[in-house]
Image (cartoon, rainbow, N blue to C red):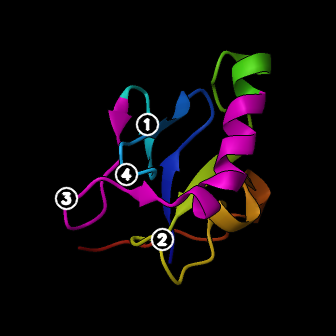
Amino acid sequence: VKFIRAVPGDTIILEEQEDGNFYIIINGKSILNSEEEPYSLTFAKSRMINLYAQEYKEKYNSKIPDNLYLVLGNQTSGTQDSTQFGLVERENIVGKVIGE
């Protein structure tokens, strides 16, 4: 299960921290995991998202283009998500979890 953390039109920026890790900033706010901690990426984990962020900064003023979504697991380790394979096209999102 993955969380959609950013949708078309959202602004995406990676902000480097003093420890060398990066926070993902969506629409001016750092995204949080379920433990209410900032979603922090190592340099290696940030590379794929950083490629998109740089491209979109130049082409789209840092906004995610139509039909693409940022999907993340709750934690940064041990998950296959946009940090591994980039943004996801709408047609590849196959379901919705309902509940608490």
Mark carried by residue 36: 3
Residues 69 and 38: in front is 38
Write down the residue under mark 4: 19
For label 1, count other residues whose C-alpha is less than 10 Å away and answer few (under 14), some (14-19) or many (20+).
Answer: some
Which is nearer the eye, 90 or 33? 33
Give the residue pinned by disc 1: 25
Amino acid under disc 2: Gly
Residue 96 lies, in percent from the top left, at: 50, 68
**Left of 58 or right of it: where is 34?**
left
Q: Which residue is mark 2?
A: 73
Lower sequence index among marks 4 and 2:
4
Question: Label 2: few (<14), some or many (≥20) within 10 Å?
Answer: some
- The Cα–Cα distance between marks 1 and 4, rounded to whole angstroms, is 17 Å
Q: Work out how far the residue at label 1 is from the one at label 3, CA to CA, in angstroms.
A: 14 Å
Q: In the current view of this chain or complex, which residue is farthest to the front?
A: 19
Question: Compared with residue 100, is residue 10 higher up or lower down, i.e. above or below?
Answer: above
Q: Callout 3 environment at 10 Å: few (<14), some (14 to 19), or many (20+)?
A: few
Query: Marks 4/2: CA distance?
Result: 22 Å
- Residue type highlighted by circle 1: Ile
Would you place residue 26 above or below residue 70 in this image? above
Of all residues, the one furthest to the left in this rendering is 36
